[in-house]
Every structure is written in structure tokens, then in C-alpha cells.
Amino acid sequence: MKEVSDRSGVNYSTLSTYSRSPGMAMVDFTCLLKLARTFDVMVEDLVEVVKE
């Protein structure tokens, strides 16, 4: 996670919180965008849309 934090610019503690989440988590869109760019994927590949 340290390498991902360094490469993406997302704070390590934020990544740690996301990774410890047992299921769905509210995330910051800016962080998602940075992670998507880091891994060269679309934001849609990182999220699951839940219909109410």
C-alpha cells in the first residue's frame, strides 16, 4: 500500500481505511480518480453501483 500511496498521491491512511472496510465504503471521488489513473483503469472498474 505504501507504493500505491506514493504512486497515486492518495494518503496511506486513506488507503488503509479503504482496505480494512469489510464491505461497502464511502470513498472520495478524487481518490478514486487518482487510483484509477495509477492502475490505468476506468473509475467504473473500481466501484459497484448499488441500486436502492
Image (spheres, rainbow, N blue to C red):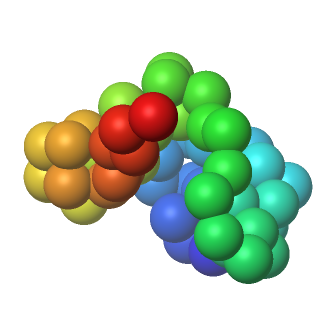
Q: Nearer the viewer, residue 41 or 12?
A: 41
Residue 31: tell me if it is visible. yes
20 left or right, relative to 3: right
Q: Nearer the viewer, residue 8 or 27?
A: 27
29 shown above or below 26: above
36 left or right, relative to 16: left
- Quadrant for residue 3, please give it: bottom right
32 shown above or below 13: above
| Residue at horizontal 65 percent and vertical 70 percent from the top | 23
Q: Nearer the viewer, residue 30 or 6?
A: 30
Residue 17 spot, x, y in % from top left: 81, 60
* Residue furthest top in the image: 30
* Residue furthest left in the image: 41
Task: For the N terminus, give its image quadrant.
Answer: bottom right
Q: How many marks?
A: 0
Residue 40 spot, x, y in % from top left: 14, 53
34 shown above or below 13: above
| Residue at horizontal 67 percent and vertical 39 percent from the top | 26
